[in-house]
Amino acid sequence: MPFTLATWNINSVRLREPIVCKLLEEEGPDILCLQECKSPVEKIPMERFKALGYHHMVARGQKGYNGVAILSKAPIEDMGEMDFAGLGHARHVAARLDNGVVIHNFYVPAGGDVPDRAVNEKFGQKLDYLTEMRDWFRDEQMTRSILVGDLNIAPREDDVWSHKKLLKVVSHTPEEVEQLGQTQEAGAWVDITRKDIPDGQLYSWWSYRARDWDAADKGRRLDHVWATPDIANAGHNSRILRAARGWEKPSDHAPVFATFDL
DNA sequence: ATGGTGGCCGAGCCA
């Protein structure tokens, strides 16, 4: 049975409840993975999502910051969470579908402004988080798994509006790109979005600070869908719903979709 | 070179 999933950094699930519902109604993914819910789990407006057919949720939350959730039409099993780099943040949760596929939903630390761990502790935490992800994937050797989320890194030159201008900007520095590459390699993860859309500029995030985000189009591809090699061939139909960036009271991220024939 | 916006909560932190 094929299923479609979407991943979306929602920047407050309570404030954005109307556009989460809009996405569920108009696009109807089987699974929606959210990041930056910025809410305790018990305050996520689950009744609204249930009314649209999404009766199941696996989530981790905290007050005001971070938070990840997996919404599903079909039952899912809570597979726990990891707390990398000892941050004590709600940045990961995993769920298993009936077909045995495990979905890992990540919100990797943004890393602050200065790309130097000697002067910016947050940048060091981001690198450490990725290192611990790498070590976990190396030790676990996962199969039948999908990894989605806001990884806060745009790895390719065509994942950003200007490779040259962003080389020293956190999210596209060579150090981060190298670290993300190691994390991806450790689990042999296949970038499904780029498998489906191999060429051309591709973004999932546009800053709130731009005068006209659409016209300026200074985007970055921070949000990712990866799969383990045993199921990577089942992934297809990747797309980024850019229109959602222009919805009422938008998130600064657009949802990323993929379908898996499994 | 700087400041631009937005969300958490109701100041200052985080993105």
Image (spheres, coloured by chain):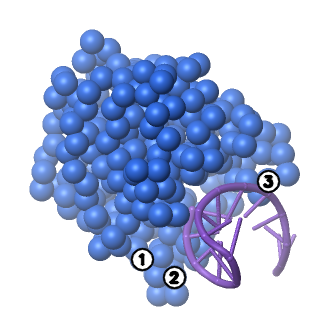
Chain colours: A blue, B purple
Residue A150 shows in the view: no
Callouts 2 and 3 in the same chain: yes
Residue at 35% x, 19% y: name it. Answer: A3
- The label number, if any, that marks residue A120 in the structure image: 2
Give amino acid for label 2.
Answer: Asn
Check disc 1 and report its element: helix, strand or loop: helix
Residue A17 shows in the view: yes
Check disc 2 and report its element: helix, strand or loop: loop
Are dots 1 and 2 in contact, CB under 8 Å?
Answer: yes
A250 lies left or right of A106: right
Chain of the residue under the numbered disc 3 shown in the image: A
Give amino acid for label 1.
Answer: Gly
Question: Would you name the residue on which mark 3 appears?
Answer: A210
Location of residue A195 in the rendering, given as x and y in whole percent from the top left corner: 41, 29
Callouts 1 and 2 in the same chain: yes
Location of the C terminus of chain A by quadrant is top left
Between A16 and A32, the one lying in front of the other is A16
Q: Pointer 1: residues within 10 angstroms few (<14), some, or many (20+)?
A: some
Q: Is residue A128 above or below residue A18?
A: below
Alpha carbon separation for disc pair 1 and 3: 28 Å
